[in-house]
Every structure is written in C-alpha cells, then in structure tokens.
Amino acid sequence: MLKWALIFLVISLISGFLGFSGISAATATIAKFLFFLFLVIFLVFLVLALMAGGAVM
C-alpha cells in the first residue's frame, strides 16, 4: 500500500510539473489517503503485535 502511495505521489509531481493541475490534485489526494490508511493499518498491527508479545512472556 505504501508502494502505491509513492507511485501516486510521483504521478502527482510529474503531472503538476507538466501543468495538469486537476490530475495532480486528484492523485495527490489518493496518495494522501493511501498513506494514512497504511499508517492506521501499521499502527493497528503494531499494537496487536505488542499485545501478543506481552501475552507470551
């Protein structure tokens, strides 16, 4: 998912440089959404791993 966020970020930067502001804004929004979704999923799995690690000890 982080890979897709970076891909959309690069597309956004290239389209912004070429003057396609509508496409640039749309892909930047998608990149932000995917990044924050990745961050939330990462934190959920981190908390679950810490809780499971504490149960083993």
Image: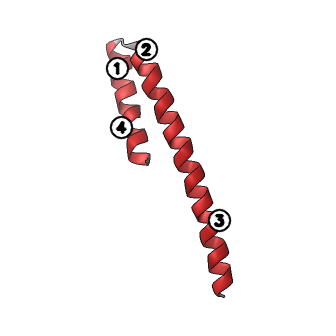
* As drawn, 18 above or below 31: above
Q: Amino acid at mark 2?
A: Gly
Of the numbered discs in the image, which one, if any, rests on residue 54? none
> Tag 1 or tag 2, which sits nearer the N-term?
1
Q: Amino acid at mark 1?
A: Ser
Cα separation between marks 1 and 4: 12 Å
Give the residue pinned by disc 1.
15
Q: Amino acid at mark 4?
A: Ile
> Tag 3 or tag 1, which sits nearer the N-term?
1
Which type of secondary structure does the marked residue at label 4 adopt? helix
Which type of secondary structure does the marked residue at label 1 adopt? helix
Image point 39% across, 33% down: which residue? Answer: 8
Image point 36% across, 11% down: which residue? Answer: 19
* As drawn, 48 above or below 56: above
> Tag 4 or tag 1, which sits nearer the N-term?
4
Toward the bottom, the furthest residue is 57
Give the residue pinned by disc 4.
7
Cα separation between marks 3 and 2: 38 Å
Percent across and percent down for residue 53 are 62, 79
Q: Nearer the viewer, mark 2 or mark 1?
A: 2
Give the residue pinned by disc 3.
47
